[in-house]
Image (cartoon, rainbow, N blue to C red):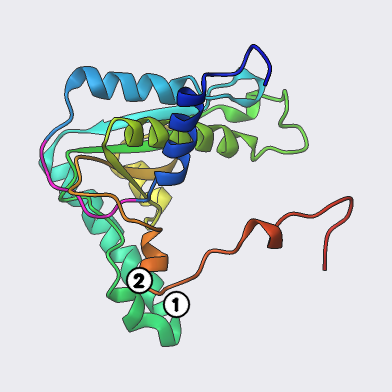
Amino acid sequence: MNDRAFSAEERAAVYRAIAERRDMRHFSGGDVAPELLARLLEAAHQAPSVGLMQPWRFIRIRAPELRASIHALVEEERCQTADALGERREEFMRLKVQGIHDCAELLVAALMDGREQHIFGRRTLPEMDVASLSCAIQNLWLAARAEGLGLGWVSLFDPIALAELLQMPPGAKPLAILCLGPVDGFYPAPMLELEGWIRPRPLGDLLFEDHWKT
């Protein structure tokens, strides 16, 4: 071990947060103290970004009527997704896919407008703005788990409709509805695995050497 590594206890805490992070759907109400929310958002803001473009924008949803409208958008897309799943429709409809009404804090994570001006690292891979925002969300997720809070990423929504609802400027794009807050407990495994929807694949199936494995 080199002299720049964290202590054994610190390393264990990092790996524990990664292993126990869950996409939460069940929340127990309550609240998130302002100083804690600020700490979590600062963790998100410390994420790496391509060309230091920092494309993330976070909108904290405070108005109850706005939360209700966002919930309605998610429900509309949930039904359309169910229809698109065909024979798995009813199975999907039994899944809990969001906690918008139950979470203490509701955030929308979005990409900024004017992203086309940022060329560094994006000339051939323009989607690196999405990758950068995803890193910020992951920072927030891990920090929330370390603080004992749950976070759920909701992606069932029409981005154009949500952008209009939140009065985003042209070119800005919402990527995630984030449900954040206290939970009664964390799932022992990913919820979709517990519900029998899908089984995660082992790393060995996804790790190649030199060339793509067929």
Q: Which residues fall within the magenta stretch? A: 24-30
Question: Could you tell me if residue 176 is visible in this image?
Answer: yes
Return the x and y of residue 113 as percentages of the image width and height.
50, 29
Q: Is residue 202 left or right of residue 102?
A: right
Instruction: Find numbered disc 1 in the image and state the secondary structure of the residue it sits on.
Output: helix
Instruction: Find numbered disc 2 in the image and state the secondary structure of the residue it sits on.
Output: loop
Q: Residue at x 84, y 58 (%)?
A: 212
Quadrant where the C terminus sits is bottom right
Return the x and y of residue 86 as percentages of the image width and height.
44, 84
According to the picture, the residue beneath numbered tag 1 turns out to be 84
Q: Earlier in the sequence, mark 2 or mark 1?
A: 1
| Residue 25 part of the magenta segment | yes
Which mark, residue 195?
A: 2
Quadrant where the N terminus sits is top right
Q: Amino acid at mark 1?
A: Ala
Return the x and y of residue 145 as percentages of the image width and height.
34, 37
| Residue 115 part of the magenta segment | no
Q: Amino acid at mark 2?
A: Glu
State the separation of the CA atoms marked 2 and 1: 20 Å
Mark 1 surroundings within 10 Å by alpha-carbon count, few (fewer than 14), some (14 through 19), many (20 or more): few
Q: Main secondary structure of the magenta part?
A: loop
Direction bottom: furthest residue: 87
